[in-house]
Amino acid sequence: MGWRVGVDIGGTFTDVALIDEETGSIGIAKVPTTTRDFTEGVTSGLREGLARYGVPPAAVSRLSHATTVVTNALLEKNGAKTGFVTTRGFRDVLELRRSSRTDLYDLFQDAPAVLVPRRWRYEIAERIDAQGKVAVPLDEGDVDAVIAAIREAGLDTVAVSFLFSFLNDAHERRVGERLRQALPGVGVYLSCEVLPEIREFERASTTAVCAYVGPLLTRYLDRLQGTMSDLGLPRLLVMGSSGGMFDVAEALRMPAMTVESGPAAGVIAAALVGKELELPDLISFDMGGTTAKASLIAGGEIAVTAEYEVGGAGHSKRWLHGTGHPIRVPVIDLAEVSAGGGSIAWVDQGGALKVGPKSAGADPGPAAYGRGGMEATVTDADVVLGYLDREALLGGALRIDLAAAEAAIRRVADPLGLAIPEAAARIVEIVNANMAEALRIVSIERGRDPREFALIAFGGAGPVHAAALAADLLIPEIIVPPAPGAFSAIGVVASDVKRDYSRTLYADLAMLDPARVAAVLADMEATASDMLAAAGIPSERRVLLRAADVRYRRQAYELTVPLAAGPMSRASLDALASNFHEKHHQTYGHATAVEAVELVTLRLTAVGRLPGLQLGRLPGGAAPARRRAREVWFAETGFATTPVHQRDELTVDHRLAGPAILEALDSTIVIPPGWIACVDGGGYIRLRRR
């Protein structure tokens, strides 16, 4: 037994979580994110956390990391000089995309950015037909010309995506072999290695994304791994977007898998809380420095989508189709809005108060942090209203400049003719409305009633605003976990090793030979077993989960249906068809049992189960003494003298009636009038309306 350590980089702070595998005790460290070089912040946070809790590097059994490098590279458009090689006649597939648009009736909307300029997109004469047969042989002369063009352009990487290569990858692999031999310094990403699936544009886009961000991710992880080795820490694992860890080598083979890894970790931790508390239905709410994220956990199951767009409309949003770069990898289904502690408030030309999407980030940060920031932010409003300590945060490590916060709020208050507290209250009201929209997207817009769910609130600012959001959506209970400010880092620690594989096998189920299915699955399972072995997972902790994308003939999209383990037989395929009919009825309200069913893609999820974690329990004892009080603004009362307590002084079953404030090293919990907070035996703060 030892310590598991997880690191999560946020827009404002880098969080480190340490969990003792034997006792479940949690340690945390928060340091400012170093945007110029994330490695510096990670190293600083690890050193601080290990020193604070007296954990020698040799006692760390597992080191895991959620990275924002891929997402940031796409948002900031600072990836590699990338080329794209495709079948003759399909040079513009990345630009033509699909027909979906953010606003169907806006004729003046900007076209989505293209990662690869047209001058670096190359065609080669070759053609595989829809049955996987060679229709046009590969032209080796065209390959020579492409090699020369890539060399002359000085490209860093190249993505190769040929038509129907998921059925027959011979041409694509031959071109990859030629490119790697002739251009040893150029990274080569083949769609048959990245995503051997149907759908030409999504496959090409995913491969291009991997090529675009690959060099940046490689440099970052190599540098970080070297630093971790110098500190005497174990080999690094990277968090994936679907909620599992894999080693650095897997991340570099498929960089797109690390998109949204930090938010995914928070949802994993929320699901762990639901399991501990026997609450299968939760809405996770994560509010950090730059964004707020929401996700639904229903029946203990986390919603995962295979379609995601990153870099669209200035941010990563699953529901804004057609605005970003599609990646077809499993991603935990999140609704994300540009609303965080650092979100900047401003007055538009019409005199309306707005909040976001621009953020003060980590540098300079909110004005209240005293690092040169002058724009009004949500954090400044929280300080002015008394939700946050007006003297210091992070246990005194971060001094608060109240005068600077008030001066920043005045910048928006004066044009509106408002007093400073009134302007601060309106900023909070607006940002709460923005975040409530994210909660509605994952609940009401998915056909779920939020009144049947509990809200688990985390992130540095989540517990400050959670009660207002719960009141808006009539959510009956709020759960604030231990160390909410570093909760995503805890999710990184608690995640299993996990990797998803896919392979298109397009055929009519009734006509399909089960041996073909068995052969494809056996190949994927061999690859998955090698990955789990390389990650150090013993055989008894390895789990391989099969599934298949299935549809009716002539349908354009599929449903993913579990596929039973064991030998493949005609009965197995018949059961798959039957299960598809049932799921189609559950999803769309109808099914047609006499209609032919097509298998499209086989999927395999490889999981390496880690020993379960039990978060630390709090000891019972005498009720804590009231620490102090301060003036706090609430909509019901205006400014009111409000008791302030230290969370680590609270004991099991202690109850606090609002208004009250609970402070901890990493976060603050606001208990408004009409709410009651209680501490349960696991150290969770549970809030209910009186």
Image (tube, helix red, strand yellow):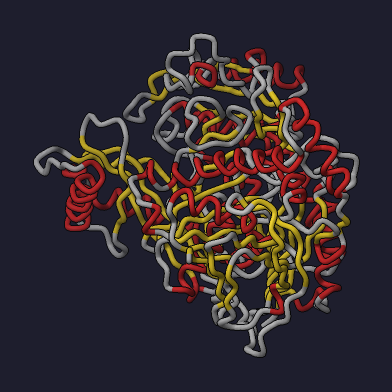
Along the viewing direction, whichever of 474 and 608 lies nearer the viewer:
474
| Image location of residue 187, percent across then percent down | 69, 35
Q: Which residue is drawn at 59% across and 65% down?
A: 658
Q: Is residue 421 left or right of residue 609?
A: right
Answer yes or no: is residue 227 visible.
no
Q: Quadrant of the N terminus?
A: bottom right
Q: Is residue 664 above or below residue 170?
A: below
Q: In this view, does 103 lie to the left or right of 678?
A: left
Q: How many labels were placed on the picture?
A: 0
Of all residues, the one furthest to the bottom in this rendering is 621
| Image location of residue 404, percent across then percent down | 87, 43
Q: Residue at x 19, y 49 (%)?
A: 577
| Image location of residue 311, percent across then percent down | 61, 31
Q: In this view, does 486 lie to the left or right of 39?
A: left
Q: In this view, does 465 lie to the left or right of 305?
A: right
Of all residues, the one furthest to the top in this rendering is 107
Q: Quadrant of residue 205?
A: top right
Along the viewing direction, whichever of 605 and 530 lies nearer the viewer:
605
Q: Is residue 340 above or below residue 60?
A: above
Answer yes or no: is residue 477 visible.
yes
Q: In this view, does 460 lie above or below 361?
A: below
Along the viewing direction, whichever of 431 and 104 lies nearer the viewer:
431
Q: Residue at x 44, y 56 (%)?
A: 475
Q: Residue at x 31, y 39 (%)?
A: 558
| Image location of residue 132, percent across then percent down | 36, 30
